[in-house]
Image: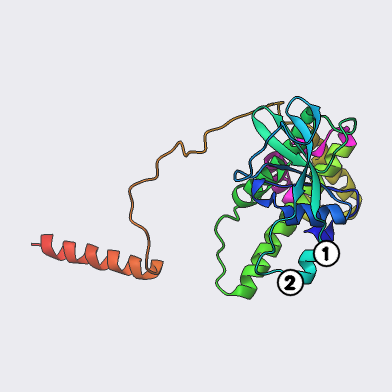
Amino acid sequence: MLPRLASGDVLLADALLTTWWIIADAQAAGIDVVMPQHARRITDFSAGRLLGHKDHVVAWPRPKRPNWMSLETWQSYPAELPVRECEVDGRVLVTTLLDLRMASPRQLDDLYALRWNIEVDWRTIKVTMDMDVLRCLSPDMIRKEIAVYLLAYNLVRWTVATAAKLSDVLPRALSFTGAKRALLAFAEQLRHSPKPRLTFMFTTVLGAISYMQLPDRPDRVEPRAKKRRPKPLPLLTEPRQLAREKLIAQRAARMLIVAP
């Protein structure tokens, strides 16, 4: 991802990406990072330059050269990497935004909370767009299937963003599921409307979507579990037509047994 980012961008990532090498590469490209501390790294707030309570700047020494890295590449990295570590609500964040005046610990925590949007987006693509199960078999067709799903997803997102701009709200304040349902409900009218009426129809759809604002749910927590139990049915491990033929044969055999 780093080659796709520009100087001045801020990279939000989870704890698995909080490595010395990724942070060093980002910092060299002028990219700042905000990440949770890796579970294996020990944070000692008594060391380094203190900025506030459980907030300091510390120098991470360059790790030993990994086997996959050449000696020349390893030597091109700096001997130390200045990073900022701060704790907010029991979570230690690591960032290259070293100036306290630029971002307080609470602002860093609010910024990192935006990373959750990508988890919501993946859920939307897999669940709302029904992409959790791919139905094609060959690699080429699977790529096309994924491309069509993403195209449809981006079209809905573009419609939501357009409706949000017209109603002066943030795009994520509007319901993606509601927008998808509205587009499906108006699909036939949009498809068959004459060109002079198409603008009116599309404005009507945007107006309907603009009213689908999500409620404010700060710090929402939901259990990661299924409420409804699946029915105790066996898995279908053979072609459906073959299974039908077996059922028909079993039914015919029972009719022969009970016939006088």
Nearer to me, 192 or 63 = 63
What's the magenta bit mostly, secondary-structure-wise?
A: helix
Is residue 243 rendered magenta in the image? Answer: no
Picture layout, residue 36 above or below residue 256 = above
Q: Position of residue 118 (x, y in %)?
A: 70, 46
Q: Position of residue 194 (x, y in %)?
A: 86, 54
Indicate the secondary structure of the residue bearing disc 2: loop
Left-right relation of 258 to 98: left
The residue at 78%/55% (across/down) is 191
Nearer to me, 85 or 187 = 85
The residue at 25%/68% (across/down) is 249
- CA separation, marks 2 and 1? 10 Å
Is residue 180 rendered magenta in the image? Answer: yes
Left-right relation of 189 to 167: left
| Residue 208 visible in the snapshot | no
Callout 1: 10 Å neighbours few (<14), some, many (20+)? few
Kindly identify which residue carries mark 1: 76
Kindly identify which residue carries mark 2: 70
The N terminus is located in which quarter?
A: bottom right
Picture layout, residue 33 above or below residue 113 = below
Mark seen at residue 210? none
The residue at 86%/43% (across/down) is 162
Indicate the secondary structure of the residue bearing disc 1: helix
Q: Amino acid at mark 2?
A: Ser
Where are the magenta residues, as a range? 166-189
Q: Position of residue 239 (x, y in %)?
A: 40, 69
Nearer to me, 186 or 242 = 242
- Of the numbered discs 2 and 1, the one sitting upstream in the chain is 2
